[in-house]
Image: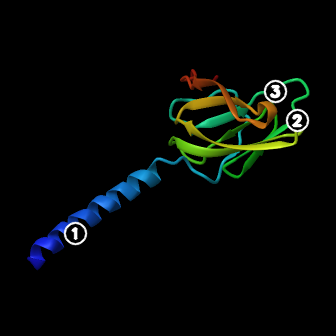
Amino acid sequence: MTGARTGHAGGICHILAVLALVTLGACAGQAGWQRDSRRACTPEDPPRLCLLAGPDAQQVVQVGGATIVPGECAAGPRARGGRIEVRVRDGRSDRDSVRGLRVRRGETAMISGVDGDVVVHERRRCEVTPEGA
């Protein structure tokens, strides 16, 4: 009896270990994001977030340790997608908002912080750029 229980318990431990790895692997890099001024990206590039510029937009976004303002973008530390926590501060309404966003490798999410809420306006797939462009 003891041997059967040990084998069963060992199987459960393996299942739990695999679930933990899958869960951890589903997150984009939560740190190491940096401002990115590139105008183009490729399908192999890390995910990017761009804060849309608007009239009188007094917004600041924090993502993965990077801080961006309207018209700026930030790129992840590695070429993998997942979920990332995005924090936006709207200076006009003095509101903060936090939202988990799904990001993908080779994609740029165009966001804003309307009234302090994180809004995704568009997701753009990166295209292969010609050599020397």
| Drawn side of residue 82 relative to residue 58, left or right | left
Mark 3–mark 1 contact, CB under 8 Å?
Answer: no
Q: CA distance from mark 3 to mark 1?
A: 54 Å
Residue drawn where x is 89% and y is 23% of the image: 55
Residue drawn where x is 54% and y is 32% of the image: 106
Q: Amino acid at mark 3?
A: Ala
Mark 3, residues whose alpha carbon is within 10 Å: few (<14), some, or many (≥20)? some
Q: Amino acid at mark 1?
A: Gly
Q: CA distance from mark 3 to mark 2?
A: 9 Å
Mark 3 or mark 2: which is in front?
2
The answer to whether 123 is drawn above or below residue 84 in the figure is above
The answer to whether 65 is drawn above or below residue 104 in the figure is below
Q: Residue furthest left?
A: 1
Of 115 and 112, the residue lying toward us: 115
Mark 1, residues whose alpha carbon is within 10 Å: few (<14), some, or many (≥20)? few
Q: State the residue position of label 2.
A: 58
Q: State the residue position of label 3.
A: 53
| Drawn side of residue 52 relative to residue 120, left or right | right
Q: CA distance from mark 2 to mark 1?
A: 55 Å
Q: State the residue position of label 1.
A: 10
First in sequence: mark 3 vs mark 2: 3
